[in-house]
Amino acid sequence: MTTTFPDVTISTDRLVLRPFEEEDVTALTEMMNDEYVTAWTTAAHPYTHADAHRWATRDSHAERTEGRGIVFAVTEFLTQRLVGIVHLQNTNWRTRATEAGYVTAPWARGEGYASESVLAVAQWLFRDQGFERLELRTAADNTASQQVAQKIGCISEGVLRNAWIVRTQTPDGDWTDTRTDLIVWSLVPEDLDDDGDGYEGYDSYDGYAGSTAFGQRADAHGRTVGADWK
């Protein structure tokens, strides 16, 4: 049984999803220090250049090679600018199921990049990799992330009560942990609309050479819970 994803790049009309490279470190550092990323993810705060370098050159790649999932740096096709991350994590190879997290850079929000990139990954996951389930978990108050799940056709399955910790900013500028519920969403192969909604075409190929990125070990420092804002 295959227990690692192939090393691939996925393309849509507007985006290229590829492994992280060392050249992404500066943009990654800036993106991960955004206040909304701090609030909704478990990424280190402050997110240092060293954190970004470790993620871009080592830890994001280890997600794939060690069988936990795969990390994509989402970039604009025309400018090659980093617009976000899609991270498949907590992969169960026996049941062919995995969980998607995503982050969008502040300057790129409102363009539909999160839904476009997550849907492209879902299509690749089901059609090329034979997976049967993609799960998303969104914090109860993260309405923009919930809109992404709805836009790509996910079904809301229920609520995990008091299951997650988000960070809220205090009046003096510090951050404090707050417990929250998680909404569980799922996408299975039959949920995909064969007519598509503009993202049905993608190209993928094996053998993309690159390094890694995001936080430190993703389970401790880089896990995302649908961190996207319109």
Image: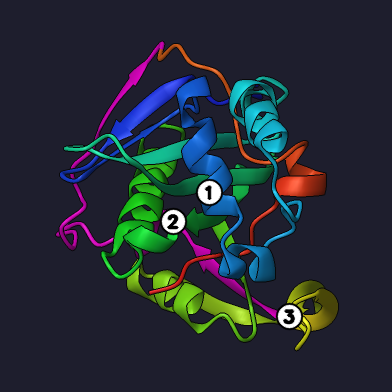
| Magenta span contains residue 191 | yes
| Magenta span contains residue 173 | no
| Badge 3: residue crowd in 10 Å (few <14, some 14–19, many ≥20) | few
Report helix, strand or loop for mark 3.
Answer: strand
- Which residue sits furthest front? 172
Q: Position of residue 108 (x, y in %)?
A: 33, 59
Residue pictured at 65% horizontal, 69% vertical: 40
Residue pictured at 33% horizontal, 40% vertical: 75
Occupied quadrant, residue 66: top right
Report helix, strand or loop for mark 2.
Answer: loop
Q: Position of residue 132 (x, y in %)?
A: 52, 49
Looking at the image, tell me whether mark 3 or mark 2 is earlier in sequence order. 2
Question: Mark 2 belongs to which amino acid?
Answer: Ala
Residue pictured at 70% horizontal, 42% vertical: 48
Q: Nearer the viewer, mark 1 or mark 2?
A: 1
The quadrant of the image that shows the N terminus is top right
Q: Identify the residue position indicated by label 2 in the image.
A: 105
Q: Identify the residue position indicated by label 1 in the image.
A: 30
State whether residue 62 is above or below residue 31: above
Occupied quadrant, residue 150: bottom left
Query: In the rendered view, does 20 fall on the left or right side of 201?
Result: right
Mark 1 and mark 2 residues within 8 Å of each other at the beta carbon: yes
